Amino acid sequence: MGLSKSSIIECLRESYGESVNSAEIRAFCKMNDFNYQTITNKLTDYKIGRGKWNLEVTKETVQDLEVTYNSPAAMPAIEQNLIPQKDDSFVKFGNFSDVRKIIQSRLFYPTFITGLSGNGKTFSVEQACAQLGRELIRVNITIETDEDDLIGGFRLVDGNTVWHNGPVIDALQRGAVLLLDELDLASNKIMCLQSILEGKGVFLKKLVSSFNLLLVSKSLLLPTPRVRVLMTDASLAPTF
């Protein structure tokens, strides 16, 4: 048998499987009259620990996998176009004109929209924003939704904890329409929105070093008095 890397790996796999240790390689060398150091030098790329080799994994393979599964950096919301696409098939119905007027007014006017499930509550808000060229940030509420999901929190980035704004803060900063979808599914975990719904802004208490206080004019955040808060529920009450 030659001493090529491929032939050594093939024999080791046949004898010991994909994973081998130093004792098995020594036994292999003794049985074939090979030098232990020579064999281990040829298996450098397959070493996964002290006295351990995986004959299916190489450093190059690991690097390729890291590149393949390296998730792309999240695009900051400020760089995204959040204006919904117009749908030519949309037909105005019900209180759509009222919703449109509220969004067009650019006044702080929290609105609760209720109605039969699937009758177009969310879609009407999206199309009103599309027609008016307004950015829309939609948040689907569940019983698990909490302050971290809405306001934001610290995330681990490159070994450091970095504050990331939640969708509510993004809406405040952009002056976008904030749509809280299926609000009736929420728990008391969304009480963090109380001051915002009262038009009093929000204090990011976790950023104690800079005391970020978002003040209120005719909206939720200076200097962009354009934020709207619309809420839908999933009930069957056919009222607006």
Image (cartoon, rainbow, N blue to C red):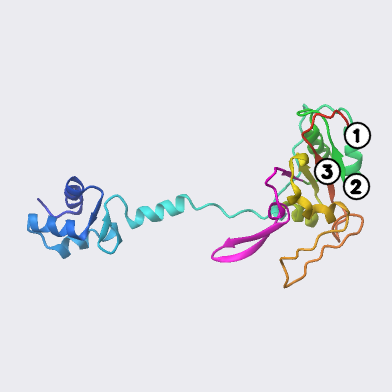
Q: Alpha-carbon neighbours of circle 3 within 10 Å: few (<14), some, or many (≥20)?
A: many
Q: Amino acid at mark 1?
A: Ser
Q: Is 161 in the magenta?
A: yes
Q: Is residue 225 left or right of residue 209?
A: right
What residue is disc 2 on? 109
Numbered circle sitting on residue 97: 1
Q: Amino acid at mark 3?
A: Leu
What residue is disc 3 on? 230
Q: Alpha-carbon neighbours of circle 1 within 10 Å: few (<14), some, or many (≥20)?
A: few
Q: Is residue 85 above or below residue 212?
A: above
Q: Is residue 78 above or below residue 205?
A: above
Q: Which residues are magenta?
A: 137-166
x, y percent for residue 46: 28, 57
Q: Residue at x 17, y 57 (%)?
A: 25
- Name the image quarter holding residue 49: bottom left
Q: Secondary structure at mark 1?
A: helix
- Name the image quarter holding residue 78: bottom right
Q: Nearer the viewer, mark 1 or mark 3?
A: 3
Whole-Å distance between the Cαs marked 1 and 3? 14 Å
Of labels 1 and 3, earlier in sequence is 1
Callouts 2 and 1 close, C-beta under 8 Å? no
x, y percent for residue 185: 74, 40
Q: Residue at x 19, y 47 (%)?
A: 10
